[in-house]
Amino acid sequence: MNSVFENILSEMHSHLEEGIIRFWSERCLDKKYGGYLTNFDDAGADCGTPEKYLNTQARIVWGFSRFYKMYPQNQNLKEIASIGVDFLLKYFWDDLHGGWYWKVNQDGSRLDDGKVVYGQSFAIYALAEYFMATGDTRALDKASITFDLLQKYCTDTRYGGYYENLEPNWDVAPDGFCAGDRKGLDTHMHLMEAFTNLALASKKEIHRRKLIEVVEVIVKYMIDHKYGCGQNQFDLEFNPIPAIAIRRTWNAEREGEAVPEPIDTTSYGHNVELAWLLHRAIKTTGMDVSRFSPLIKKLLDHALAHGVDWEFGGIYRDGTHDGNALILEKEFWQNAEVLVGFLDGYELLGDKRYLDAVENIWKFVDKKMINHQVGEWRILLDRKGEPIDNNIGNPWKVCYHTGRSMVECIELLQKINVGN
């Protein structure tokens, strides 16, 4: 490994252990009500967590389960994960209809009992990871039951894929803002991510088969193969339609510049995240990776050519399919995921341009995005790295993207022997 990447590996190790893991270990537990606190300012101070979202409570369970797998001597990591599992099972599970509520109050009382498939996917993802880390069969049982409910109530047996937004009793939500008439790449990508983990945890053929199905749906319908980038939203027949902000989504609640309408944009970070999650899913199913390698290369090369800011560093937020970057802000999660995706792409394809991108993005992240005084990443910066949203945690931003990025990058760097 050359000296540049030896230094990056060392910096990532230190940041994971002394930054991300320490930050969340010391702050995230809600000692009064259980579960996790999520909202922290730029000094790392608790801003209050009046609402607890399914996706972020599950993401912290996933995070500490994954950290425990990496550091099995640290029993505190296991304990933090188990506290989150207990809270999910007690307060988020719907005993009447099955599945997970979208949102509760801080004390666990019900706030929004809608069935959001995006949230169900993170419950599966987290519980499968927790089972693999601890052997706790409660987690695998509930993940498997959730999977079964998705097949029963959410599968579109006419056109394929999944309905994404449903009422508490699993009726499909109204059209428009509630998005009962739409399907999206984001939800299907995270279903692929969740089914990958579930297949690894359960070893069941049905989980592997359904993973193959969602891979095929994404590849067939949800990627612009001409330009090599993901498309956002579709009608139920998978015709691409202009994207709108949808209820219970990050795009509807995030800070920063809005995407111009009616331009249909693509997210560079999302595309690179898709590339490495697709690679992992394919390996898990046993399908031939070489069949998908040209597509993975297209996704990476589109972001490399149009999304990486070679002048100031980092990756832009959104752009057009044919290449022009429109939103030049730098958001935490895209910059986290592209580090993994470009390293994974280098391992798969051997293209050293991807290493140049990793070096560029990590320098920007390390210098501008990480708040080293508290150990976690700022949420949103402008192009040059000046904070727009200087907070460290919010109802959507916890240790999932940042922690996963460091874990995956460390393991990839140790594996691929960069520079030789």
Image (cartoon, helix red, strand yellow):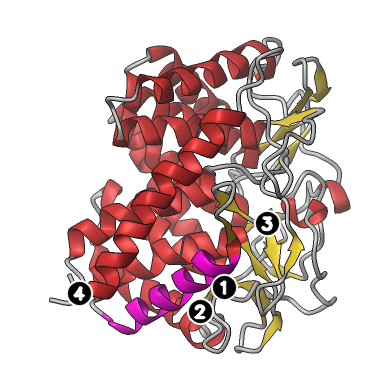
What residue is pinned by disc 3?
379
**What's the amino acid at mark 4?**
Asn
Q: Is residue 114 visible?
A: yes
The residue type indicated by label 2 comes to Ala
Of pointers 2 and 3, the one earlier in the residue sequence: 2
Q: Vertical placement of 96 versus 250: above or below?
A: above
For disc 4, the neighbor class at 10 Å (few under 14, some 14 to 19, many from 20) is few
| 2 or 3: mark nearer the eye | 3
Q: Please report contact status of discs 2 and 1: CB closer than 8 Å, yes or no.
A: yes
Q: Position of residue 93 (x, y in %)?
A: 65, 17
Quadrant containing the N terminus is bottom left
Secondary structure beneath label 1: helix
Assign a secondary structure to mark 3.
Answer: loop
Sequence-wise, the earlier of marks 4 and 2 is 4
Which residue is situated farthest in the front direction here? 373
Q: Residue, x 53% and y 81% (percent of image)?
A: 308
Amino acid on which disc 1 is placed: Tyr
Position of 395 relative to 301 (above/below) = above
Q: Are marks 3 and 4 in contact (CB under 8 Å)?
A: no
Mark carried by residue 303: 2
Q: Which residues are magenta?
A: 351-368
Q: CA distance from mark 1 to mark 3?
A: 17 Å
Of marks 4 and 1, which one's residue comes earlier in the chain?
4
* x and y percentages locating residue 106 in the rendered image: 77, 21
Nearer the N terminus, badge 3 or badge 4?
Answer: 4
Could you tell which of marks 2 and 1 lies nearer the N-terminus? 1
Question: Circles 4 and 1: CB distance less than 8 Å?
Answer: no
Residue 219 place in picture, x, y as percent? 46, 65
Q: Which mark is residue 268?
A: 1
